[in-house]
Image (cartoon, rainbow, N blue to C red):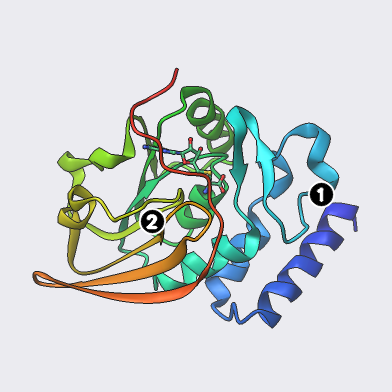
Amino acid sequence: MNDFLLHKANLIMQLRSQSITDKSILSAVEKVPREKFVPESLRQHAYENASLPIAGNQTISQPYVVARMTQELAMKQSDRVLEIGTGSGYQTAILSFLARRIYTVERIRPLLVSAENQLKALKISNVLFRHADGHLGWPEAAPFEKIIVTCQIKNIPETLKAQLKDGGILVAPVGEAGKEILLKVTRNGDQFKMEELMAVRFVPMVAGTAS
Ligand code: SAH
């Protein structure tokens, strides 16, 4: 067994002990080579349960947070998912195994291009990529059964709430920078039920795009 496989098996055991019980999520973590989504110099740390720096001063999320957000979304294979903040594309790859189609939006073009190349190399073909400001969502493809925001926002933009299907679930780190809480929002008609899950740390959502 190579080192990565051993480290990956350890990570999966940790996730299980942290109440990630959904087998399809654990199996997705097993399938996605996280070492391909981190800078070459940090590869030996790829299976630590930690966030790591990536290009553009951004971060790849901690595996537990990726798995927890995914579990809270209660994924169904028929789902169409909007993801704001593609970053490395790791969370995107995990979601791609659990849903019909992923629509992912990133404001920093080189990150989007690199994520797209990684997913192509892994033969993942149910993801659509867009270089845009995530505040806009993806109106032509709305409504979505699930929405995941992977950057810190002060409030959930109304445009994103409007793009959530009735009965759909949105998860996002919401609050002042450094004090954000992972929120789970469930839509019931015009009502949006909010549940606070846990304190998290994310890079901020920034308006506009960067090339
Ligand atoms: N899930 C990703 C997390 C990446 S960090 C991963 O695990 O790799 C969050 C990402 O959100 C960054 O890449 C950042 O550029 C992006 N982001 C910030 N503001 C944004 C916006 N307005 N629209 C789209 N993406 C945004």
At 41% from the left and 30% from the top, the residue drawn is 107
Query: Residue 75, can we see it?
Result: no
- The residue indicated by pointer 1 is 45
On screen, residue 113 versus residue 193, left or right, reads: right
Q: Position of residue 22 (x, y in %)?
A: 54, 78
Q: Position of residue 196 (x, y in %)?
A: 40, 75
Is 126 or 186 nearer to us in this picture? 186
Q: Amino acid at mark 1?
A: His
| Residue at the (64%, 57%) spot, across then down | 62
Residue 125, by quadrant, is top left
| Image quadrant assignment for residue 132 | top left
Viewer-side residue, 19 vs 77: 19
- In the rendered structure, which disc, 1 or 2, sits on the residue that comes first in sequence? 1
Residue at the image position 75 percent from the left and 75 percent from the top: 13
Three-letter amino acid code of the residue under disc 2: Ile
Q: Is residue 129 left or right of residue 198?
A: left
Task: Report helix, strand or loop for mark 1.
Answer: helix
User: Disc 1 and disc 2: Cα gap in Å?
Assistant: 25 Å
Q: Quadrant of the N terminus?
A: bottom right
Label 1: few (<14), some or many (≥20) within 10 Å? Answer: some
Looking at the image, which residue is at 86% across and 62% down?
A: 6
Residue 22 in view, yes or no: yes
Q: Nearer the viewer, residue 61 or 82?
A: 61
